[in-house]
């Protein structure tokens, strides 16, 4: 089947589920998570229509963004302070911010580049120890601290659901959605208006996420792996 066909198939499925859920397909971005393939694999998806890609390692972000400069690139991985300048130089959106000290370093790097960096706050909704992210009860204060920085714009929240249990995944997507609503309501109007993104759902659970208001589904294997033919 190949990457291009799998991309087209996944985009059609997302559109279909949006229709079924009464959502506008234009409001759900399919982020093509190309972390397991080389530039050629990402290019195959690009030719099939993918325009926004996710990477979880700074080196790969830099390399692939340079090779496919017309695409948009998001950073979805673990943030390390020393790699922040590379991430800020290439990422339109950082999904995985959950530490205040990184918010300040991203603000500093963005300021030097004359950029306002869009970020999402990663929340550990399920509370699993293996997951990164801020605890739900600490999310509002982190959003407020980050949103006060001049070169950061907090666009919303991101979570990773427990794997292998769609009911548990759905519960964490519902938790993320209600947290998003609470935080949006607590923000001043100028910040609330751009707090409009929910990054939730991966290859195996994105349908549940779309049903729970996700605006960005991060799909890797269903596009890039033959396991998903
Ligand atoms: C790898 C990864 C994905 C994609 O996962 P798949 O199960 O391959 O779709 C999504 N989000 C993050 C943060 C990832 O690291």
Image (cartoon, rainbow, N blue to C red):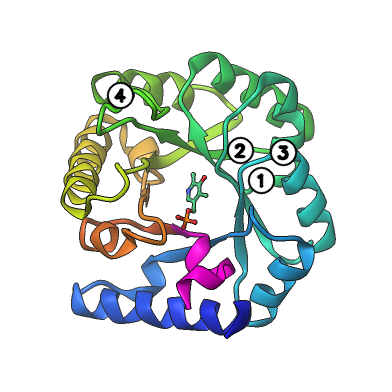
Say whether disc 4 or disc 3 marks the residue closer to the N-terminus: 3
The quarter of the picture where residue 37 lies is bottom right
Residue 142, position in %: x, y? 39, 20
Q: Nearer the viewer, mark 3 or mark 2?
A: 3
What residue sits right under mark 2 in the picture? Answer: 117
Do residues under tags 2 and 4 come within 8 Å of each other at their CB atoms? no
Boundaries of the magenta span? 218-229
In screen coordinates, is 50 left or right of 155?
A: right
* Viewer-proximal residue among 48 and 192: 48
> Going 31% across and 74% down the picture, which residue do you hit?
24
> Going 79% across and 61% down the picture, which residue do you hit?
69
In screen coordinates, is 183 left or right of 106?
A: left
Residue 192, position in %: x, y? 33, 40
Q: Secondary structure at mark 4?
A: helix
Q: Residue furthest front?
A: 227
What residue sits right under mark 4 in the picture? Answer: 140
> Which numbered marker is on residue 58?
3
What residue sits right under mark 1 in the picture? Answer: 91
Vertical position of residue 197 compared to residue 95: above or below: below
């Amino acid at each position: 089947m190949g990457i291009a066909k799998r991309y087209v198939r996944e985009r059609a499925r997302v559109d279909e589920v949006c229709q079924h859920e009464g959502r506008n397909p234009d409001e759900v971005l399919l982020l093509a998570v190309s972390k397991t393939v080389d530039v050629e694999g990402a290019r195959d998806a690009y030719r099939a229509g993918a325009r926004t890609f996710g990477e979880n390692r700074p080196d790969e972000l830099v390399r692939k963004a340079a090779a496919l400069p017309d695409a948009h690139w998001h950073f979805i991985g673990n943030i390390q302070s020393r790699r922040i300048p590379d991430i800020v130089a290439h990422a339109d959106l950082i999904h995985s911010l959950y530490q205040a000290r990184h918010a300040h370093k991203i603000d500093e790097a963005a300021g030097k580049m004359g950029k306002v960096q869009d970020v999402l706050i990663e929340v550990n909704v399920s509370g699993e120890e293996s997951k990164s992210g801020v605890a739900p009860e600490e999310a509002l204060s982190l959003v407020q601290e980050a949103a006060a920085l001049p070169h950061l714009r907090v666009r919303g929240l991101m979570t990773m659901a427990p794997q292998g249990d769609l009911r548990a995944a759905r519960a964490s997507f519902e938790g993320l959605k209600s947290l998003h609503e609470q935080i949006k309501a607590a923000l001043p109007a100028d910040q609330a208006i751009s707090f409009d993104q929910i990054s939730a759902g991966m290859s195996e659970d994105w349908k549940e996420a779309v049903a729970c208001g996700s605006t960005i589904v991060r799909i890797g294997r269903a596009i890039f792996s033959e396991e998903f033919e």
